[in-house]
Amino acid sequence: MFERNRSKKVELLAKVYDHAKHKYRFGFRMLTLGWSDGSTFLPVNSILLSTENKKNRINEAAKVDKRTIGYKRRKLSMEKGTSAMLTLLETARKAAIPAKYVLFDSWFSSPSTLHAVKGIGYDVIGMVKKTPKMFFRYNGEDMSLVSIYNRNKKLSLIHI
């Protein structure tokens, strides 16, 4: 969350839900793409996300030429976080930033997002939401996360 509570005239300023404080705030959601070797984190690209919903936007974007990078960034800021994340990954791929994996939390771990990231050329490491509505292919079979977990529990070797 990138709060701008005292601002009124910031372009694309929006009323955004802060999940940490469980309140709506004026500002942006900041999405950062970074590269890491496990010890170091280097920010590569970022975007301040506004909202798609015009009712929640305080100010609209200024009129700019559609051929400019400014227009493209403004348009990207009004997309959903998952599609903006895919755009940032495609930009990193085109810039030849060396990476084999993408690591993210459960916020982005829907099957469609996992497939889209794989389509860009990266493998995925991430937390998966525990929900009975999502199924994953495991050993050629569609299974829920709970079923996969139950099949792979450590067996107790201690017998009394």
Image (cartoon, grey):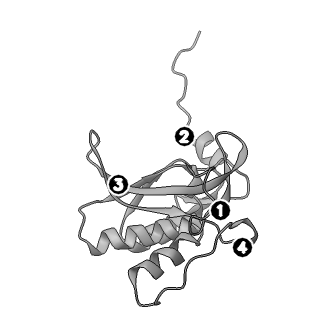
On screen, residue 45 above or below 156: below
**Disc 2 to disc 3, C-alpha distance:** 32 Å
**Disc 3 to disc 1, C-alpha distance:** 25 Å
The amino acid type, in three-letter code, at marker 1 is Ala
User: Is label 3 or label 1 in front?
Assistant: 1
The amino acid type, in three-letter code, at marker 3 is Gly
Circle 4 packing at 10 Å, graded few (<14), some (14-19), many (20+), is: few
Figure quadrant of residue 149: top right
**Disc 2 to disc 4, C-alpha distance:** 46 Å
Q: Residue at x 37, y 65 (%)?
A: 122
Q: Residue at x 70, y 51 (%)?
A: 131
Residue in front for this viewpoint, 44 or 150? 44
- Pointer 3 or 1: first along the chain: 1
Please say if the residues under marks 2 and 4 sit with CB atoms less than 8 Å apart.
Answer: no
Mark 2 falls on what kind of element? loop
Marker disc for residue 14: 1
Q: Position of residue 99 (x, y in %)?
A: 28, 60
Q: Residue at x 66, y 72 (%)?
A: 52
Please say if the residues under marks 3 and 1 sit with CB atoms less than 8 Å apart.
Answer: no
Marker disc for residue 34: 3
Mark 1 falls on what kind of element? strand
Circle 1 packing at 10 Å, graded few (<14), some (14-19), many (20+), is: many
